[in-house]
Amino acid sequence: MIRTPLLPCIAAACAALCAASSPAAEHVDARSRAIHESFIALDSHLDTPALLGVAGWSMLDHHSVVADGSQLDLPRMIQGGLDGGFFATYIGQGPLTDAGRAAARDAALLRLQEIHQLVAANPGKFEIAYTADDAARIAAAKKRIVYLSMENGYPVGQDVSLLTTYYTLGVRIAGPVHFLNNDLGDSSTDPKGPQWQGLSPIGKAYVKEANRLGILIDASHASDQVLDQLLELSTAPIVLTHSGAKAIYNHPRNVDDEHLRRLAAKDGVIQIYAYSDYFVPNPRPPEREAAIAALRKQYAGQRSRVTLEAQAKALAEIDRKFPIPRGTFEDFIAHLLHAVKIAGVDHVGIGLDFDGGGGVAGLEDATDYPKITARLLKEGLSKDDLAKIWSGNVLRILKKAQLAAQTP
């Protein structure tokens, strides 16, 4: 049920290869860099925990997106001025059976344990954040901030009481669905179309339980009907930890202007991703698909740094033989600026989806975060605006969710 490292490698390798043909890299001058370092910078959707169980791969080592497909580690966080973020426990959607749900639960518990083990083994470098206020304290101690999130409600299954277990282990953001419909509600991308016409009855109980605990609900991947119902039912603001603007590119994963306005009216926040498939057309040449399928089969079940590097090399060759269009840094900026225009600067943030398929030409890994600050300053946004976008907005609504949970 756990996503293999192959999928992130595909996106990362493509982005790196396209960098050479992308527009000139955004220049980061000394002033922009100083401003970037002056506030807490958080990314609301990091899938790097999927790599923690890979033999020989260490979060403390400096890796390369070209060499092994990975996009984030401690050295690159430091280089890119990223103070931390929400580290996702992602479990891919599997069969809606008792056995499938149990396997998803166990996989989620293992992934959460791996994150805790990383932090426990490196107490001077990382610290888990449990409240919105923890971020400033951890940053002041010169440690990286590790919030925990859960992408996809499959590990909850039909038992919303499991949210209490995940909350106890540190989960502070959770989304009910992913690529496919599940027990909780409808996905924006299930080829079968809606099953529940929004949230299921269990999904509505999930909302109530998340509100009770103070878990911020993530509407990324959710259908428009689910988003409508979340905005109606939730007593706390809603976040989309990694999404885009439908007005810039019409894809079901992106959010239309009407929903952006409704999200902002309920004090919610959309965090903009850098996911090429949702920025530009995504053709699937049969030869390329066949080559990727063969590669998946060849490395199925192999989880080591050596095999990651071999996969990245093979994927680079596939990209050379069967190139496809890739999104760019300019696409990312267009989505972000549109969201600011429609929802307002108080309701936009950054969630690039690194190590989960994110990464576009010119925005390939964690070393590139300062480019965003430099560009937004050129676009006329202020230092205060950037502080909101980089962490202030998502922390504000996390605090609201936590305060609401404490209110009788």
Image (cartoon, rainbow, N blue to C red):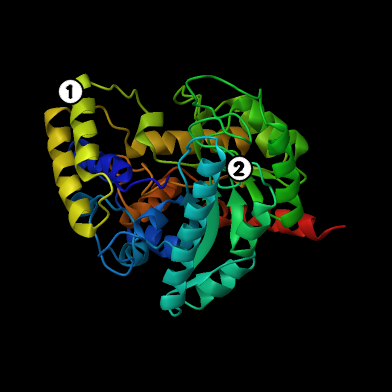
Whichever of callouts 1 and 2 sits on the residue coming sooner in the sequence is: 2
Residue at image position (22%, 56%) is: 64
Q: Rate crowding at label 2 as few (under 14), some (14 to 19) or many (20 or more) other CA atoms within 10 Å.
A: many
Image position, residue 139 (x, y; %):
51, 71
Quadrant hosting residue 196: top right
- Residue depicted at 60% across the width and 42% down the height: 157
In this image, 180 relative to 237: left or right?
Answer: left
> Label 2, on which residue?
157
Q: Nearer the viewer, residue 379 or 398?
A: 398
Q: Position of residue 326 (x, y in %)?
A: 28, 32
| Viewer-proximal residue among 170 and 91 | 91
Identify the image quadrant of the C terminus. Answer: bottom right
- Nearer to us in this view, 83 or 150: 150
Report, in whole angstroms, how far the alpha carbon at label 1 lies from the one at label 2.
37 Å
* Percent coordinates x, y for residue 240 in the rendering: 57, 41
* Residue type at the position of mark 1: Glu
Query: For the point 59% across and 63% down, which residue is it?
Result: 170
Residue density around tag 1, few if under 14, some if 14–19, many if 20 or more, within 10 Å: few
Q: Which numbered disc covers residue 287?
A: 1
Q: What amino acid type is highlighted by mark number 2? A: Gly
Residue 107 in view of the camera: yes
**Whether residue 18 is visible:** no
Q: Position of residue 254 (x, y in %)?
A: 50, 29
